Image: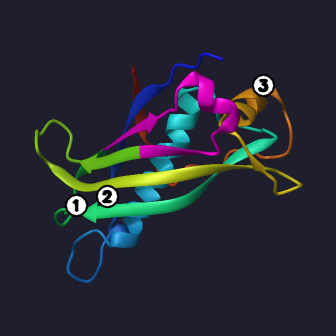
Amino acid sequence: MTFTVKSVSTRLGVRPADLDSLGHVNNARVLEYLETSRWHWLDANGLAGRRRVVPVVSRVRIDYLRQIPVCELRVDTSLELPVDEDLEFTFRVRFQQVVAEPGRAGSAFARAELEVAFVELGSGRLSSVAEFLGSSHEHDLAPSPPPLHQPTVSADAT
């Protein structure tokens, strides 16, 4: 099975409700920015929507590099996909995400590495990457959640 994925950049605006008492984005909100961008990554790669096997975040590591002020943000999302031969026997993949200020080199506010496992709805059975990719054309159960923001998305083939 050959599968090509695109890296995705999602633009989000910081909202007043995202700020803490010091006027900076609360670290917990960064998780929401990352989640929103991953849903847009799924959509841009034709993997969003109703499906039998769904991705579930199993591990998150975020390096907060500097405070995030009120500004426009760019969240870059890419996937480390295992080699084709391993898809049947691989149960997790790793996303790399960067929250930055658009148009400014070296402007990263946070970097994240997330591991995602795949679970079959109904049974809760751990599923392989190949099963997840194969379920992209099936129409069962799981609708996409509504976005937290109204982002703009651009996709680049990797």
Q: Residue at coordinates 71% horizontally, 46% vertically from top-left?
A: 54
Say if residue 79 shows up in the picture.
Answer: yes
Q: Is 102 inside the magenta-drawn segment?
A: no
Quadrant (top left, top right, bottom left, bottom right) of the N terminus: top right
Q: Residue at coordinates 86% horizontally, 39% vertically from top-left?
A: 140
**Alpha-carbon span between mark 3 and mark 1:** 40 Å
* Residue wearing tag 3: 137
Q: What percent of the width, then of the height, locates residue 110?
A: 26, 57
Judged from this view, the residue extending furthest toward the left is 105
What amino acid does circle 2 point to?
Val
Segment tinted magenta in the rendering? 75-95
Per the image, label 2 sits on a secondary structure element best described as loop
Q: Are marks 3 and 2 in contact (CB under 8 Å)?
A: no
Q: Residue at coordinates 42% horizontally, 32% vertically from top-left?
A: 153
* Residue wearing tag 2: 14
Say if residue 17 shows up in the picture.
Answer: no
What amino acid does circle 1 point to?
Val
Q: Residue at coordinates 71% horizontally, 36% vertically from top-left?
A: 132
Per the image, label 3 sits on a secondary structure element best described as helix
* Residue wearing tag 1: 70
**Alpha-carbon span between mark 3 and mark 2:** 35 Å
- Mark 2 crowdedness (10 Å alpha carbons): few <14, some 14-19, many ≥20: some
From this view, report whether residue 151 is shown above or below residue 56: above
